[in-house]
């Protein structure tokens, strides 16, 4: 069969792009290494996922799901003092954008995959893309291996790399760039029965500090489960030679009064996950016959839960742009210039807030006390409303801590 587009990876980026393209009637094939449902980290959504979920026809499914409703983010000091929550409804409509969800990714990603299938996308699972086929200076398709080790090939005028942290084509093309500063480690697990805040704050994400700008996430999920993880510099987490993930995790619990108190009511369900070296940028967003989407294009840091938002947003945008290119009979990389620039603006805005957050001298409270109007803009950024002019906010924050310059990444690589 001939395809109009090949999509590598069935995470939120891949299924978003596939849904849009299939809905327009294009022949789309998603090639996924795992068998769904499969485990994945990245469970807290932020409000601006709303537009993508709406465009994909996912809102009715989200609203009837078991996913916990999330209205805010709260920060907690080491001694257990909670900040006033950043409520999204102070800036956005309470019944739509301002209410988002804490998802279980195996369930959410399967819903997204089923949605793409309903719209007409074809899916093959347990099949790994092992390389790209290059013809006449462009990517013409992919080589794959199925679960039995049988190799084959698929071809299409465009291939979308949605491989997440594998960043398949970024690695193959030598485009994978480290972030100049971000380089943390995360250790996480799940608790059943951890304490929750009352009322509207029940589903809030809590970011609870430990020393050296490390922090815990506490993400309430359905079935009385909580995802809880600690993120910090490797040197800090492994101090005194502690290397075992469970030992690292349990030691850090003692560093934050709120986390200690909340987890004391629950039971660790076992299984400790670790990941490192996840912050990266791709030098280019596209080349002839190839487009990068979601984490395969860039991933910053877990702290403000922007990963799934950027996966959904790039997925929808990629689907729309590829659709236009297929209609025009022109999928040249130039077509993806605006795509690359739009996403880089999102990333650079989020990146400034992430850098500020990790600076030893930074606190949201200091900024908001001196410049109360910044509270709203910080909430906007935390909501994922990241394609707007934040020059006032960055000017104010720069009085407290230095902010990074934009990185020169994300443009398409034009044909030679
Ligand atoms: C510690 C940590 C915590 C996080 N917390 C959050 C959070 O709270 N909220 C949030 O929004 N984000 C969070 N994220 C980020 C989030 O996990 C990602 O941004 C998101 O999953 C990206 O979606 P994606 O579709 O681009 O990639 P993925 O969801 O990773 O999907 C990629 C898919 O590609 C498949 N694949 C890979 N290679 C191949 C291949 N060669 N052939 C075939 N298939 C392949 C994989 O099996 C996978 O299914 C977190 C990340 C980390 C590291």
Image: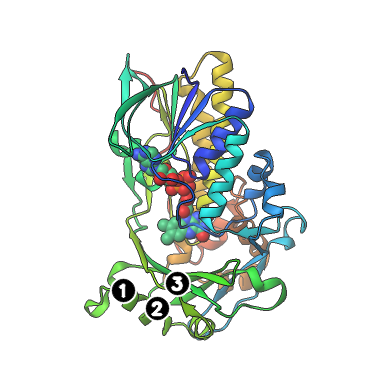
Q: Nearer the viewer, residue 248 or 272?
A: 272
Q: Residues within 10 Å of mark 2 (few under 14, many from 20)?
A: some
The reply to whether callout 2 and callout 1 are in contact (CB within 8 Å) is yes
Q: Which residue is mark 3?
A: 215
Element on which disc 3 rests:
strand
- In percent of width and height, residue 62 lies at 67, 52
Q: Is mark 2 within 8 Å of ligand 1?
A: no
Left or right of 268 on screen, residue 310: right
Q: Quadrant of the C terminus?
A: top left
View extreme (left): residue: 241
Extreme-front residue of the structure: 148
Q: CA distance from mark 1 to mark 3?
A: 12 Å
Q: Secondary structure at mark 1?
A: helix
Between residue 387 and residue 85, name the one nearer to us. 85
Residue picked out by circle 1: 236
Residue closest to the eye, 397 or 235 = 235
Res 308 visible: yes
Q: CA distance from mark 3 to mark 2?
A: 8 Å
Position in image of residue 121 (x %, y %): 55, 31
The colour scheme is rainbow
Of discs 3 and 2, which sits in the foreground?
3
Percent x, y of residue 369:
63, 73
Q: Is residue 132 above or below residue 214?
A: above
Label located before the other in sequence (1 or 3) = 3
Disc assigned to residue 211: 2
């Amino acid at each position: 069969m001939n395809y109009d587009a090949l999509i590598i990876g069935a995470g939120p980026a891949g299924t978003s792009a596939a849904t849009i393209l299939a809905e327009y009637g294009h022949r789309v094939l998603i090639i996924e290494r795992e068998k769904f449902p499969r485990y994945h980290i990245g469970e807290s959504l932020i409000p601006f996922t709303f537009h993508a979920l709406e465009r994909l026809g996912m809102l009715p499914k989200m609203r009837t799901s078991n996913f916990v409703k999330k209205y805010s983010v709260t920060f907690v000091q080491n001694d257990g003092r909670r900040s006033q929550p950043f409520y999204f409804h102070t800036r956005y409509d309470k019944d739509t954008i301002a209410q988002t969800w804490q998802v279980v990714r195996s369930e959410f990603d399967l819903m997204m995959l089923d949605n793409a299938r309903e719209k007409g996308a074809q899916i093959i699972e347990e099949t790994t893309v092992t390389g790209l086929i290059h013809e006449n200076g462009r990517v013409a398709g992919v080589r794959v291996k199925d679960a039995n080790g049988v190799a084959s090939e698929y071809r299409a005028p465009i291939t979308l790399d949605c491989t997440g942290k594998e960043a398949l084509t970024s690695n193959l093309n030598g485009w994978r760039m480290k972030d100049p500063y971000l380089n943390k480690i995360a250790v996480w697990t799940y608790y059943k029965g951890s304490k929750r805040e009352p009322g509207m704050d029940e589903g809030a994400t809590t970011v609870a500090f430990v020393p050296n700008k490390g922090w815990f996430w506490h993400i309430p999920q359905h079935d009385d489960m909580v995802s809880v993880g600690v993120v910090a510099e490797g040197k800090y987490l492994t101090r005194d030679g502690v290397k075992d993930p469970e030992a690292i995790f349990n030691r850090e619990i003692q560093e934050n009064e709120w986390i200690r108190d909340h987890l004391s009511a629950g039971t660790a369900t076992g299984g400790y996950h670790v990941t490192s070296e996840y912050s990266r940028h791709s030098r280019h967003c596209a080349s002839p016959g190839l487009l990068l989407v979601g984490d395969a294009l860039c991933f910053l840091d877990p702290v403000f839960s922007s990963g799934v938002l950027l996966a959904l947003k790039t997925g929808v945008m990629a689907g729309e742009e590829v659709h236009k290119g297929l209609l025009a009979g022109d999928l040249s990389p130039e077509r993806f210039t605006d795509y690359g620039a739009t996403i880089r603006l999102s990333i650079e805005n989020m990146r400034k807030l992430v850098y500020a957050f990790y600076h030893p001298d930074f606190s949201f409270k200091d900024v908001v006390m001196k410049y109360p109007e910044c509270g709203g803009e910080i909430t906007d950024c935390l909501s994922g409303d990241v394609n707007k002019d934040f020059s006032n906010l960055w000017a104010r924050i720069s009085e407290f801590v230095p902010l990074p310059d934009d990185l020169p990444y994300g443009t398409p690589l034009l044909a030679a």
